[in-house]
Amino acid sequence: MEKNNIVLTEAVFYTLLALHQPLHGYGIMQATERMSNGRLKLSAGTLYGALSSILNKGWIIELPGNEGSRKKEYKITELGKKVVKTELLRLAELLENGKKIINNNSSQFIS
Amino acid sequence: MNKTVFKKFFVWEYEKEENWLNEMSKKGWQLINAQLFKYVFEKGEPNEYDYRLELLDNKLGTIKSEEYINFLKDSNIENVGRCCNWIYLRSKKSEGSFNNENKLYNSLIKAIHIDNLYQSTRNIILYFLIFSLLGLFLCQKLDLNINDFLSGFLTGFFTGTTIALSLFSLIIIPITNKNKKKITEYIKDLSVLE
């Protein structure tokens, strides 16, 4: 897996976070909006595309449906959890470097 | 109170069509059914709904497409009509389901789906063109043992189809290229913004 070079989109990152518990599509949208304090509202089209793509990658699985319900539920896999952890390291690096440059106001990192 | 409107839009005029549906919504006419050139509106509140046109991915089978439409329904987006692979979607303005959209990404997906459509159309034209040219060639070169009327008719027919198909390609090629340019622009933007 090319996990060292993966950069997740916001939509995928929040979807993977939300799917640490089983949720259906609309549940993911609500969870994402809640986690980001209303900043990130996923559109149905974007989410549908993201879900089918990360299903193919094996980062999430579709749970066997309850009878009488046409809403599909999804959950993150072990592989998916690994991807999130790797992404967290990358984000931490971004954050750290960003803070260093912006806060220190020193030019040692720029030159 | 309902009213039916007959109006034609070409495939590449989907933005114009979408704008028109939203203009109608502003006037209080809410689309409840759409087929080829035929639109049925219902009198409702002005600006009650937002309308969107989407082209389904032709690689999605019927079941997958239904699944997608159901998925949209769960997030309060209603499918009110369908024409080939185009679906007419609406959502209550108050719920604002369309406002969340990643516009750049959606425009790119739309342009790619339309490109697929143009490509399959272009392929069909090419096949027919080859068929016509072959027919024309056979009429000219082979001494068909048939009467003058039939061979004259066949020559005329194949000449006609060849000219018609060539003209059609002349129309469709610039449209396809314009759409391709759009795709390139979107991809350039995507390298900076998500």
Image (cartoon, coloured by chain):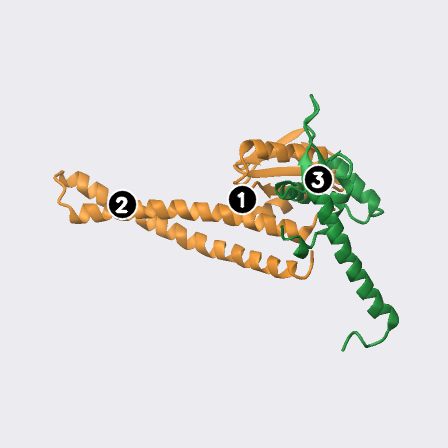
- Residue B67 picture location, percent across and down: 62, 32
**Chain B colour in the picture:** orange
- Residue B158: mark: 2
Alpha carbon distance from label 1 to label 2: 30 Å
Query: Residue at image x 60%, y 49%?
Result: B109
Q: What element carries label 3?
A: loop
- Chain identifier, colour green: A
**Image-based side of B175 in relation to A57, left or right:** left
Alpha carbon distance from label 1 to label 3: 46 Å
Chain that bears disc 1: B
Q: How crowded is mark 2: few (under 14 residues within 10 Å), some or many (20 or more)?
A: many
Q: Is mark 1 on a helix, strand or loop?
A: loop
Q: Which amino acid does label 1 sit on?
A: Phe
Query: Residue at image x 22%, y 41%?
Result: B153
Q: Which amino acid does label 3 sit on?
A: Thr
Q: Name the residue carrying label 1.
A: B9
Q: Name the residue carrying label 3.
A: A77
Q: Identify the residue at the far right of this view.
A: A104
- Mark 1 and 3 residues: CB-CB less than 8 Å, in contact? no
- Mark 3 and 2 residues: CB-CB less than 8 Å, in contact? no
Q: What residue type is labelled 2?
A: Phe
Nearer-the-camera pick, B186 or B159:
B186
Examine the image and state in which quarter residue B80 appears.
Answer: top right
Q: How crowded is mark 3: few (under 14 residues within 10 Å), some or many (20 or more)?
A: some
Mark 1 vs mark 3, foreground winner is: 3
Q: Is mark 2 on a helix, strand or loop?
A: helix
Q: Is residue A53 visible?
A: yes
Nearer-the-camera pick, B53 or A77:
A77
